[in-house]
Image (cartoon, helix red, strand yellow):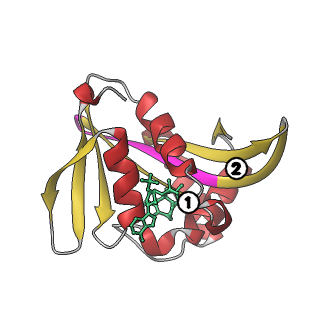
Amino acid sequence: MLVFKRVTTEAEAEILRTIRNKCASFMTRSTEEISPEQQKAWFKTAFKKYELYIAYYVEYGAVVVDAGFGVIHLEPEQYLLTGGLVPEYRDKGLGKHLFKFLVDNCNKQLLIRLEVLKSNIRAFKVYESLGFQVDGETDKIYTMEYKYDSGI
Ligand SMILES: CC(C)(COP(=O)(O)OP(=O)(O)OC[C@H]1O[C@@H](n2cnc3c(N)ncnc32)[C@H](O)[C@@H]1OP(=O)(O)O)[C@@H](O)C(=O)NCCC(=O)NCCS
């Protein structure tokens, strides 16, 4: 199972950077790797605008490994979610758990949205199963909005 820890220190931000870089090619905005220096500079203000999480995979009550990351970005009048799992923990059904956690941590007065590459079928399926629906697209990306009446 996954257990979530809010990122509050530079050391944790560094763990988040490492996980995020393993997911870089699936990101919709920047697919560049983030350097330790960039992360340090970003984190100085980022922790105020974003809720950042590390997802630890826990077995028999012991932390096994940092398996994923999640970001809740509060934009004007909406949340934008992103996240990902390291390769060894993909394709095991954990993605739904990760993104449900992020949805559950949003204030339900606002829109909850995310972006996904059209080629990222695995992520798209997870989002659909949680109650997100496509509300826009570009040539490479779908934007999706969480439907509050989806019952998830
Ligand atoms: C996206 C991600 C969170 C999904 O989580 P996951 O635990 O690996 O996904 P699952 O194992 O639950 O698979 C999701 C579904 O996609 C299906 N699937 C996987 N690969 C597929 C493919 N190539 N074609 C069709 N369906 C596929 C699975 O069968 C599953 O369907 P089911 O729920 O009906 O059984 C995870 O793979 C990940 O972190 N990927 C890299 C980073 C990333 O893409 N982040 C999202 C950025 S928008």
Mark 2: secondary structure: helix
**Which region shows up in magenta?**
68-77
Asked which quadrant contains residue 73, the reply is top left
Q: Which dot, 2 or 1, sits closer to the camera? A: 2
The residue shown at (65%, 59%) is 89
Q: Is residue 136 left or right of residue 91?
A: left
State which tag comes first along the sequence, 2 or 1: 2
43, above or below 119, in the image: above
Crowding around mark 2 (Cα neighbors within 10 Å: few <14, some 14 to 19, many 20+) is some
118, above or below 151, in the image: below
According to the picture, the residue beneath numbered tag 1 turns out to be 41
Residue 75 part of the magenta segment: yes
- Place of residue 137 in the rendered image (x, y in percent of width and height, measured from the top left): 15, 63
- Place of residue 60 in the rendered image (x, y in percent of width and height, measured from the top left): 85, 38
Q: Name the amino acid, label 2.
A: Glu
- Place of residue 138 in the rendered image (x, y in percent of width and height, measured from the top left): 15, 68
Residue 70 part of the magenta segment: yes
Say the numbered circle drawn on residue 54: none
Crowding around mark 1 (Cα neighbors within 10 Å: few <14, some 14 to 19, many 20+) is few
Mark 1: secondary structure: helix
According to the picture, the residue beneath numbered tag 2 turns out to be 12
Quarter in which the C terminus is drawn = top left
Q: Is residue 120 left or right of residue 132?
A: right
Asked which quadrant contains residue 151, the reply is top left
**Residues under numbered marks 2 and 1 in contact, where contact means CB atoms less than 8 Å apart:** no
Q: Name the amino acid, label 1.
A: Ala
- Place of residue 27 in the rendered image (x, y in percent of width and height, measured from the top left): 41, 67
